[in-house]
Amino acid sequence: MSAITAELVPDRDVTYGRSPAWHFATDVWVLTRRSIARIRREPETLADVTFMPVIFILMFAYVFGGAIALPGRGNYHEYLIGGMLGMGLAQTAPGVAVALVTDMSTGLIDRFRSLPMSRWAVLTARSIAELLTQIISAVVVVGVGLAIGWRVHTGAADVAEAFALSLLFGYAFTWAGVCLGMALRSPEAAQQSGFIIFLPLTFVSSAFVPTQGMPGWLQPVAEWNPMSALAAASRHLFGNPNPAAAVHAWPMQHPELAVVCWAVAMLAVFAPLAVHLYRRKAPG
Amino acid sequence: MGEVPAIEAEGLVKNFGKTRALAGLDLTVPAGSVYGLLGPNGAGKTTAVRVFATLLRPDGGRAQVLGHDVVTAAAQVRRRIGLTGQYAALDEYLTGRANLVMIGQLSRLTANAARRRADEMLERFGLTGAASRAVKTYSGGMRRRLDLAASLIGYPSVLFLDEPTTGLDPNARAMTWEIIRELAYSGTTLLLTTQYLEEADQLARRVAVIDGGTVIAEGPPDRLKSSVGGERLEVALAAGADMATAIAAVMPFAAGGIQPDGDGRRLSVPVAAADGLTTRVVRALDQAGIGVNDVTIQRASLDDVFLSLTGHVSAEAGAETPAETGAELEGSLT
C-alpha cells in the first residue's frame, strides 16, 4: 500500500468553482440515481406500490364492491379507480419514511451532513425518487383498472389533468413521509406508521365508498379529507361516477382546486418542516 | 509551531436535555499527528467529534478546524474533513464502488475524478475484488475498510475516527491499526476516539483523557503514564534472602510503599524513573548480602492512568459495548 492521503486534490478534479444551483442539481442527481440503483437491485422494494394496489383493486372490485351501492347507480369498478389512484400514491409515504430512518440509523445521513454538499439535496432526491415510484404505482393502477373494465369518458386534456393533479398531490404527500422519517427513530416504527396514519387516512374518505353512507358526524371529516378531494377530482376528470358532486362541502364542489390547495398547503408545511428536522442541531 | 492547529476547542458545552455531554471542553490538536481522545462510555468523546464534524451545534464555547469555525464556517470545515463513525455509514444495497463514487461526487469531486479516486481507494484497501458486490454481502472488517475509504475519498486534511475498531475482531482491528499508522505517516491529522487504552497507547502521539465532558489529563502517553507512579521495580530474591534486610536496602530508592509478595521472595518497589537506577538497586541489595535472581521494570499502563484519574476502570476491563454512547446518539437525533 502506498501512502493514502495528504495528496492534494488537483484543481481540475474538483467542482468548487461551480454555482450553488449546479451543485444542488448534481447532488440531487447523484442521490436520486442511488435510489433508482437500489430499486434496480432489489425490485421487491416496489412491492408496496405494485402488489398492494393490485390486491386492493381486486378485493374491492370483486369482494366488497358488490355490497357497495353508489348513489345514482354508477358502475363500482369505474368508481373505484379514481380512489385507488390516490390510495396507491399515499401508500408510498411510509416507504419514504422507512428509507430515511434507515439512512439515519446507519449513519449515512450523518456522513452526508459532514460533506460539503447541498443541505436540501438529500431530502429533495428522496422525494424525486419517490415520485418515480408513484408513477409506477399509477401505471399499475391504470393497467389493472383497464383490465377490470374501468374506462375514461373524457378527452386527453382532462385525463392529463387528472394524472398531473394526482402526481402533484403525491409529490406533496411524500414530504409528509419525509417529515415522519426525520421524526421517527426505527424503521419498524416508520413501517407501522403506514397502518396507524395512512390507512385510516385513505379509508375515512371517498376513495373506496361514497361519503353519503357514513354516519353524520364522520361525513365532514371524510369530505374534507384531501384523499376525497383527489378521488373526486380524478372521477370528475375521467368522467367516472362521482357521487361526491352531490355533496355540498366546498372541496367536493371544487375538487380540482381543493387538490391544488391541499398540495400547496402540504408542501408549504411539510417541506420546510422536514428540512428543519434534518438540520436540527446541525449548523448551516 | 506557529502553524494553525488542526483542531482547537475552547470551553465547548453541549447539553442533551438535562444531560451535560460536554462541560467546557478545551482541546488543541496539532496538525499532522494522531491524537487520541480517550474516555469511558458517555464521557463525551462522540459528542466532541460530532461538534468538530459540524454535525452538532455546540451550546457554548467555540471550536475551529484548521482555523475555520465549526458553526459560522461549517461549509469550509466540511471541505477539509473526513468522518468515520462507529457504524459503517454506507448504502447497503449499492456496490462498494458505487458507494465510493457517490461519496466522492458529493464531496465535490467531478464524476471522472470520483471514479478514478474510488478505484484507487478500492485498490489500496484491498477491496478491488469485492468492488462490484453489494455492501450487504461484505464482512464487518470489509465494511469498516470501505467506510474508511469513503471518509478518505474527498482528500481530507483532518480525519475523525470515532471508535474505529469497536466491535471488530482482532484481525480486522490489527488491519485498521495498520491503516491508521499509514495515514498518520502520510501527514493527515487523525482524531481518534477510543475506549481501548491499548489502542490510544499504540497509535496516538498525544492523548486527552475525557470524563464527564471535560479533559482531565492531556499529553503524550508516556508522560501520562509516568505521571501516575512512574515505574515499578519487580525484584525476585534468591532463596534464603531475608525480606526485612532487602526492604531496608531498597528503601532509599522507593517513591512509595514497598509491597513484599506473598511467598516472601518478591518485592514490588515504586520508583521514580532515573538513569542507572536498576544498577544501583542491585548493587545496594548485593552489599546487604541479598541475592537477586531477577529484576524487571514495570511501566505504568494507561489503565493505571485511567484508574487514578477517573476512579473507575476502563471499559476495556469490563464487557465490550459496541454501541458507545446510546444517550449521546439518541440525543443528537431527536
Image (cartoon, grey):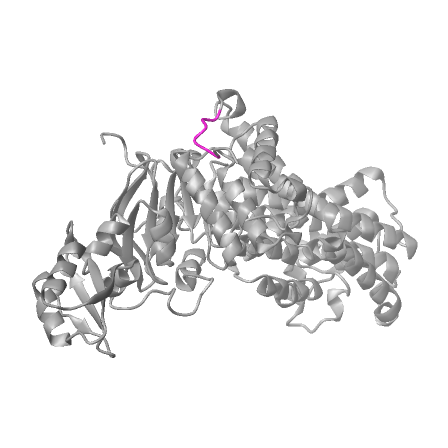
Query: Does the rendering let one see residue A235?
Result: yes
Query: Does the rendering let one see residue A278?
Result: no
Q: Is residue A162 left or right of residue A195?
A: right
Choose between A36 and B5: the one closer to the eye: B5
Q: Is residue B320 left or right of residue B258?
A: right
Q: Is residue A282 above or below residue B152?
A: below
In the rendered image, the quadrant that contains the N terminus of chain B is top left
Give the image quarter of residue B30. Answer: top left
Q: Is residue A85 left or right of residue A224?
A: right
Q: Position of residue B38 (x, y in %)?
A: 33, 55
Q: Position of residue B194 (x, y in %)?
A: 38, 55
Give the image quarter of residue A217. Answer: bottom right
Q: Residue at x 44, y 59 (%)?
A: B334
Q: Residue at x 59, y 35 (%)?
A: B118
Choose between A118 and A77: the one closer to the eye: A118
Choose between A139 and B57: the one closer to the eye: B57
Q: Position of residue B204 (x, y in %)?
A: 34, 47
Secondary structure mainly formed by the magenta segment: loop
Is residue A106 a member of the stretch shown in magenta? no
Choose between A61 and B51: the one closer to the eye: B51
Residue interval drawn in magenta? A4-9
Q: Position of residue A53 (x, y in %)?
A: 79, 58
Count of numbered labels shown in the rendering: 0
